[in-house]
Amino acid sequence: MDSQGSSFDHVVRAPEDPILGVTVAYNKDQSPVKLNLGVGAYRTEEGKPLVLNVVRQAEHSLVNDKARVKEYLPIVGLAEFNKLSAKLIFGSDSSAIQDNRVVTVQCLSGTGSLRVGGEFLAKHYHERTIYIPAPTWGNHPKVFTLAGLSVKTYRYYDPSTRGLDFQGLLEDLNSTPSGAIILFHACAHNPTGVDPTLEQWGQIRQLIRSRGLLPFFDSAYQGFASGSLDADAQSVRMFASDGGECVVAQSYAKNMGLYGERVGALSIVCKTADVAGRVESQVKLVIRPMYSNPPIHGASIVAAILKDRDLYNEWTIELKAMADRIISMRYQLFEALQARGTPGDWSHIIKQIGMFTFTGLNTEQVAFMTKEYHIYMTSDGRISMAGLSSRTVPHLADAIHAAVTKAA
Amino acid sequence: MAIMKVFSSRILSRITVPGARSMSSWWRSVNPAAKDPILGVTEAFLADPSPDKVNVGVGAYRDDNGKPVVLECVREAERRIAGNLNMEYLPMGGSLNMVQETLKLAYGENSELIKDKRIAAVQSLSGTGACRLFADFQKRFCPDSQIYIPVPTWANHHNIWRDAQVPQRTYHYYLPETRGLDFAALMDDVKNAPNGSFFLLHACAHNPTGVDPTEEQWQEISYQFKVKGHFAFFDMAYQGFASGDPEKDARSIRIFLEDGHLIGISQSYAKNMGLYGQRVGCLSVLCEDEKQAIAVKSQLQQLARPMYSNPPVHGALIVSTILGDPDLKKLWLKEVKGMADRIIGMRTALRANVEKLGSTSSWRHITDQQIGMFCYSGLTPEQVDRLTNEFRIYMTRNGRISMAGVTTGNVGYLANAIHEVTKSA
């Protein structure tokens, strides 16, 4: 009997992921001075990944707890984790939480929270278009498209100032259909590192509320941007406390270093507790056919840390240290370029916030830096500051200087 | 930092937005969703204060004291991996190590197909995640196809293919009169389906009925699938759990492989390794050659990336630690057999108890025709309601009993209750 032909013979090979492909190329390079500034994962001064002390401690106590079992979590995940996550982003004094109008469900990190939120909106919200900033994290358009929404953009980054195109942003948000969903990065915009000021957030909020638009926040860097959990949540809290509704995706990948454990939470702030109850029941129907219930390990670690005062405090210290190291790298790189007299205004390096710097280098310059200096970064000119150390800053500064002065 | 304090929530709540549209909820028209029929049972059970309550609802294993179990091999694996070097992202396709070990379980330890790299495989979020990824993949690359689903099946199968927007059809499977397989009708449905149809098959220990085709019947099904050019997608959630022997439980899949079918498989470690909440599984699609497998895997990754980016690392580490260590693997196989044997023992005990009470109904099916975690008792929804309301016995209304919830301590009580609600039938 002949073996049947494949039902999937026509399937072509998909292109490499643009971000993860950088690490693939880096790994192949044999040069001793190679530098990986691609994917946004924190590295120590020694260039090593970091498991936070509080995470080790929490894991240790979990492993040793004989009473722990690995049963299924409820569809919405670990209840304690959900409560603590909501408090973390909205503030422990949040009136929305006190009024029981916040639905919080554990999801698979930021990506999973965005996808579940997007699918819920596609099924239950009356306006099925989401506006994302230009540029944004490469995965955003795919997440929302597969969730069933149509995706459009609004102006955000101004290459000529390497800052926020605030006028363009306001104009674009003023011309969306009423009720459209607007995606915001809560802080530390990826890839540009450019955030609105608090005053600008205030204006954005007024526009959103007056036009009846629905804000959807992606919070992947709370605590990582400024070093302060509360400061980095101000944009979200501004919206959550004005009586209106909003959607928030939280990730613990970076700020707790839990990357591969896939820990996150989706929150929907509703008008009333009754609405919140009904919304939660429908969110469960999105999750069940996707993966039934979320993974228990990472969420247990987060809950253990957030609920213990000592562990929580220790976490804030470790978090601030990571944020401070990144800020220090920014200053060192800026000063190194000043010292070399590299042409151009490089102040955006210290003005931009969070893990990434949008250097403004073009694809030719990036390719030059990879070829001649073994610097690996995404072709849009984004560098992960977390991949730098005091030891490697001079090499990067040399590469940028060479690219700017020599390359086309 | 002073400016931060100005924006305290007290002050913000007093800000009014001139000309704002009245901020009513977007979600007024959202109806409360129906409770999940399976997980809702456990919720109700937990809420019941009665000391006699029995949970034979959800399919999670319990020991003879009715307690959940963490396998020894799992505890040892966790000890070894605690204090791990890092928690970095896995690749989109998950842990290569874990996937390789998992393929060996399904396709055979020395499978040529694995050696020839013909299998596109990715780590998935347990069985649910594997099925959903496959359904999304099927929709994207065979957009005109439908999925044939057995009647009955695990309720979430319908949700999965529905959310993937793949139209569903059903095929005959369970015959209530015999409480066994409706083989003739099943074969008719296979023959009458258009050539090249996609079928969902339970590899072993069918959920919810416990009814599996015999080896001879699987041979016939495989043959007819060849004639019709059908695609077989196996959901294998209970390998090792049905007979106690993982090789034996994979027999249906091996028959199809021997016949040259290019199949797809969803594998789960939720039950057989007790890793429920860790969400560890694997989706594999057998291709014609390595090139095709690379292409298919890359496309599966493209579907995973916008769903969760990459799968969770912890559960995968547990699996690869166990399966990669010969001693731990041996221990695991022993523990799986132990679980399967206990369940087989409870089947025998339940049937014996009900028959002893003088039941005139036939309870042969509990031991002779059904296998695995679930027993399709044949009880009607009304009888199930009586079991719950009068006897505090919790199970799904389709009459499915999770044998894992039966213990030497409660089997008599359960048998008595079943007899009570059926004797007037």
Image (tube, coloured by chain):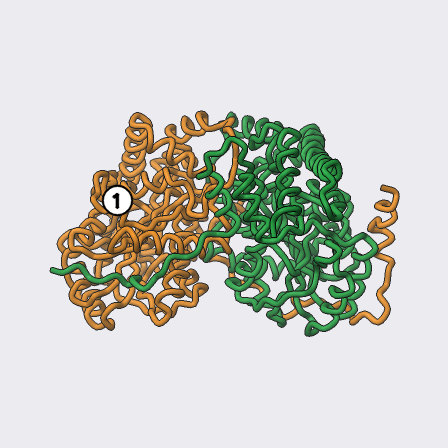
Q: Tell me the residue at 43%/50% (across/down).
A: B394
Secondary structure under the numbered disc 1 in the rendered image = helix
Mark 1 crowd level (few <14, some 14–19, many ≥20, 10 Å Cα)? some
For this view, does A144 lie left or right of residue B316? Answer: right
Q: Colour of chain A?
A: green
B232 over B317 or under it: above or below:
below
Residue pictured at 23% horizontal, 53% vertical = B212
* Left or right of A202, for residue A72: left
How many marks the image carries: the answer is 1
In the picture, which chain is orange?
B
Could one spot residue B229 in this view of the protein? yes
- Pointer 1: what residue? B114
Where residue A199 appears, as percent x and y from the top left, is 83, 55
Quadrant assignment, res A315:
top right
- Considering every residue shown, the one lying at the far left of the view is A1
Residue B216: horizontal and vertical position, in percent? 13, 54
